[in-house]
Amino acid sequence: MTTSISPHQLAEIHRSGQAVELLDVRMPAEFREMHVPFAKNVPLDRLEPKQIAAARSGRPNEPLYVICLSGGRGQIACEKLTAAGLNVVNIEGGTSAWAAADLPIIRGKKSISLERQVRIAAGSLVLLGCVLGFLIHPLGYVLSAFIGAGLVFAGVTNTCGMGMLLARMPWNRVSETCS
């Protein structure tokens, strides 16, 4: 089971001078927009637990802290990292809670969040399917049904194919210089 701590507890550990390795598992565009100063960006879709474990060979028992926007992706990353034998700690409430606690944060270029991009794309495709079905041919409704089924699948499995696809789009790519 993964343990978790509050942003204030992590900030106190960092202030005490103790070595803190913090992985931010959000997408690079999200990381660029706002992140904890000492966080390293390793997006969840590129997380390689075995590589991280190998890189930490000299300190396998030291905690590895994980953060995302609100805690969900962080929990998924923690489960993967724990399965690789690492001592992992999730940050409760993620970067949002860190910022709300008025702790130091680096702010950069704003972007549309991936979650919002998925809502825009899914809503647009459902609307398009309805318009096509009404005006052109009833088979147009199949597009709306397909998107609806995809959203149900995303909710049940906690994975979003549309989100993963959108994350790879050029406007969501960020140079590797912001870590």
Image: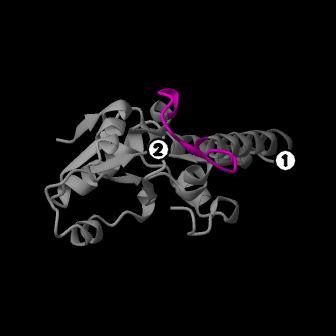
In this rendering, the answer to whether 164 lies above or below 119 is below
Residue at image location 25% in from the left, 56% down from the top:
81
| Segment colored magenta | 99-115
Q: Is residue 111 magenta?
A: yes
Three-letter amino acid code at the position of disc 1:
Ile
Q: Nearer the viewer, mark 1 or mark 2?
A: 2
Residue 3: where, in percent of width, then height?
21, 38
Q: Which of 127/27 is in front?
A: 27
In this rendering, the answer to whether 86 lies above or below 92 is below
Q: Secondary structure at mark 1?
A: loop
Q: How is the image coloured?
A: one colour
Q: Check disc 1: other Cα within 10 Å, few if <14, some if 14-19, many if 20+.
A: few
**What is the quadrant of the N terminus in the image?**
top left
Residue at image location 49% in from the left, 51% down from the top:
26
Marks 1 and 2, Cα distance to the nearest angstrom? 29 Å
Residue 57: where, in percent of width, then height?
17, 70
Q: Secondary structure at mark 2?
A: helix
Residue under numbered circle 1: 136
Residue 119: where, in percent of width, then height?
64, 40
Question: Quick one: label 1 or label 2, which is nearer the N terminus?
Answer: 1
| Circles 1, 2 touching at the beta carbon (< 8 Å) | no
Residue at image location 33% in from the left, 44% down from the top:
14
Residue 82: where, in percent of width, then height?
20, 53
Find residue 17 and name its label: none
Task: Give the dominant element type of the magenta stretch: helix, strand or loop.
Answer: loop
Give left or right: position of 24 versus 143.
Answer: left
Q: Check disc 2: other Cα within 10 Å, few if <14, some if 14-19, many if 20+.
A: some
Give left or right: position of 34 versus 25.
Answer: right
Give left or right: position of 129 versus 89.
Answer: right
Three-letter amino acid code at the position of disc 2:
Ala
Residue under numbered circle 2: 154
